[in-house]
Image (cartoon, rainbow, N blue to C red):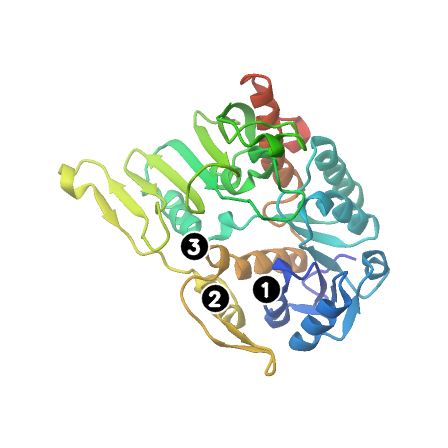
Amino acid sequence: MTVSPSAPRKLRTAIVGLGFGAEFIPIHQRHPQAELVAICQRSADKLDAIGKAHGVERRYRDYAELLKDKEIDAVHINSPIPDHAAMSLAALEAGKHVMCTVPMATSVEDCRRIVELTERTGLKYMMAETVVYAREFLFVKQLADAGELGRIQFLQASHQQDMDGWPDYWPGLPPMHYATHCVGPCLALERKDAAEVSCFGSGRIREELIGKYGSPFAVETAHVALRDSDVVARIIRSLFDTARQYRESFDVYGSKQSFEWQLCEGEEPVLHTAKKPEPEIPRRVSVPDFADRLPEPLRPFTTGGVYDADEHQHLSFTQGGGHGGSHPHLVHEFVTALVEGRDPYPNARQSANWTCTGLLAHESAIHGGAIRTLPEWTFS
């Protein structure tokens, strides 16, 4: 069902997967244009505990049963990576709009199937890429749109994380198979698509990690040519056997000003201004949370908070909301897009372009850096 501005009711949503997904429950509940109808989780104990804490009465252990619920307009999927494509396709086949956490899929073919299904049905798909709604990205995007950076000359992003000890599908995962945190901001800054990618692998992970995916690389580094642009982006990914504090970063180099994401947690990003005396070129900048872009009930979620399970409300808020304060911005974009009858950002084609850039980058690395071209059906 498509919800329009004249619809007499709110968008009715369901959240699937209550690990990371549980963080979104109060955001959906407090969005003035949404109604959280149901939650879904395989574990009965966890499902009931979270449902009780958040006051959600309709609870499903079986995803297929949830999709039969005619009162649900849209699902927000937060399942393990290997399940994203199948669950998204099943939801679309059942007539539900989809927001799914990253990445869109683990194969180019599954990305294509999702794109084709949205275009055949008219349903909406949004990949919930956190970085393009993080406060740091929103800040540099605002500078770029205002022309304060000048001509964009180069982009780079990195996502480095130690995944030892994570669920069983993670060990040995090729770094670029989970690259959207890097690819997304490079393409979203000027709303460009990736056209070509070339990638090299570096180093070697432990032998016991290599077997599952046949990927030996500790680090994968790609260059991405942007479509209809003279700009190239560099992205860096690592998941195992590389010492680095967790980091999602994005750097933009312009002719007037350049922005560099903070190197370590607790720091502020740096803004460089051209044509100044050398010591005055860099300065630390405080980044706002952009809460004013959100409905008032969602604004506190940009800075995180403490949830009171008995009172069903957030009681206190501290700077540093999850993923750069992006969570309420993601929900707001998805809900308002459906209510207004427009595509969310990123839509299905854009989500496929971002995801396939990483998948094809790894393929390039396996073949010694051979250039891979993005499919036309990923172009927006």
Residue 139 position, x and y percent, is 39, 51
The numbered mark, 2 or 3, whose residue comes first in the sequence reads: 3
- Say whether marks 3 and 1 touch (CB < 8 Å): no
Q: Is residue 114 above or below residue 329?
A: above
Name the kind of residue labelled 2 in the image.
Answer: Gly
Pick out the residue farthest to the bottom.
Answer: 311
Quadrant in which the C terminus is drawn: top right
Q: Is residue 37 visible?
A: no
Q: Residue at x 44, y 24 (%)?
A: 230
Q: Residue at x 72, y 63 (%)?
A: 14
What is the total number of numbered labels drawn onto the structure image? Answer: 3
Q: Is residue 38 above or below residue 104?
A: below
Quadrant in which the N terminus is drawn: bottom right
Which label sits on residue 275? none
Identify residue for label 2.
304
Identify residue for label 1.
23
SS class of the residue under badge 1?
helix
Which label sits on residue 135? 3
Between circles 2 and 3, the one closer to the viewer is 2
Number of other residues with Cα within 10 Å of mark 1, as a class: few under 14, some 14 to 19, many 20 or more? some
**Horizontal placement of 61 versus 373: left or right?**
right
SS class of the residue under badge 3?
helix
Q: Residue at x 69, y 68 (%)?
A: 36
In space, the residues marked 3 and 1 are separated at their CA atoms by 18 Å
**Horizontal placement of 294 versus 136: left or right?**
right
- Quick one: 60 or 190, which is closer to the camera? 60
Name the kind of residue labelled 1 in the image.
Answer: Glu
Residue 89 position, x and y percent, is 78, 45
